[in-house]
Image: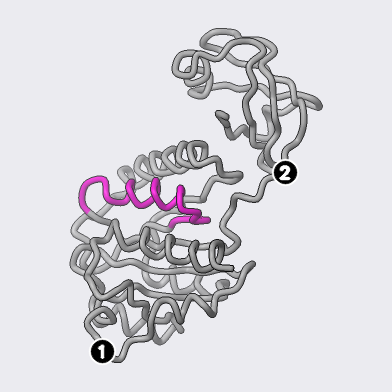
Amino acid sequence: MQRYFVDRTNWTEDGVVIKGDDVHHMTRVMRMQEGDAFICIHPVHGPALCEIDKIAPGEKVTGAVREWVTEDKELPVKVTIVQSLGKGDKLEQVVQKGTELGACSFIPFEAKRSVVKWDAKKAKKKISRLQKIAKEASEQSERSTIPDVSDVMSMTELIRQSYQYDVKMIAYEREARSENHRSLAEQLQQVKRGQSVIILFGPEGGFTPEEADQLFLSDFLPVRLGPRILRMETAPLYFLSSLSYQIEELP
């Protein structure tokens, strides 16, 4: 069933008002009519089964709440993906697919080897687009929350914020080449439900030795994502899939 995330200000005592781009999606893309049911997500109270009462084409859709719904679709570990800036739409891919796989938040990171640099004007526009992608991916994958996409961070800002996490990791390509590595499965077995995890992924050229050392000194653990070297847009998806299997699927 189609779902939409709606700001708190658009909820009434027993109903909801849909505005903006979602009106076009409901009426033009989904061709919904009065009486059709859909799911609306309240930012505090969660999902509600709603029914369309009235459609004002191009303006708003008014819905009535039929019942509040209990769901258990969120990854039981709060994972923050720190993704270095990359070429093209790679960061967009990470946010879209990472949202589908359960990530809680995303932090764009300007690494020393990042080919792309964002100026202030470009950054604001790109973050806004990434937030829209996260919203749409959350609706498509039937999640109950939308991951947060933060502003671009430096290494100093990142390390300062990292102390609030239970588990800190860095996907480090040297681990894939090392014979004395600790397996990802072994590391994920230490992650418990309810914990928070932050993990960093480097740009196309990887982390510099100086960046890696700085993170290791701040208690980030190196992670091996299999014996192969993955592209920057593939690595976060490998990690999230592995974590989901470990936490959600194993008996």
Q: Quadrant of the N terminus?
A: top right
- Position of residue 25 relative to residue 231, above or below, is above
The residue singled out by tag 1 in the image is 179
Left or right for 50, reference 81 = right
* Mark 2 crowdedness (10 Å alpha carbons): few <14, some 14-19, many ≥20: few
Q: Quadrant of the C terminus?
A: bottom right
Left or right for 51, reference 67 = left
Farthest residue, direction bottom: 180
The residue singled out by tag 2 in the image is 70
Query: Is 64 part of what is drawn in magenta?
Result: no
Query: The disc labelled 1 sits on which kind of residue?
Result: Glu
Tag 1, which secondary structure? loop
The magenta region covers 87-106
Q: Residue, x 47% and y 66% (percent of image)? A: 243
Q: Which residue is more in the foreground, 246 or 5? A: 246
- Position of residue 61 relative to residue 89, above or below, is above
Label 1 or label 2, whichever comes before in sequence order = 2
| Residue 230, image x, y percentages | 24, 65
| Residue 143, image x, y percentages | 56, 44
- Position of residue 82 relative to residue 185, above or below, is above
Query: The disc labelled 2 sits on which kind of residue?
Result: Thr
Q: Residue, x 29% and y 58% (percent of image)? A: 234
Given contact means CB atoms under 8 Å apart, are the residues at marks 1 and 2 in contact? no
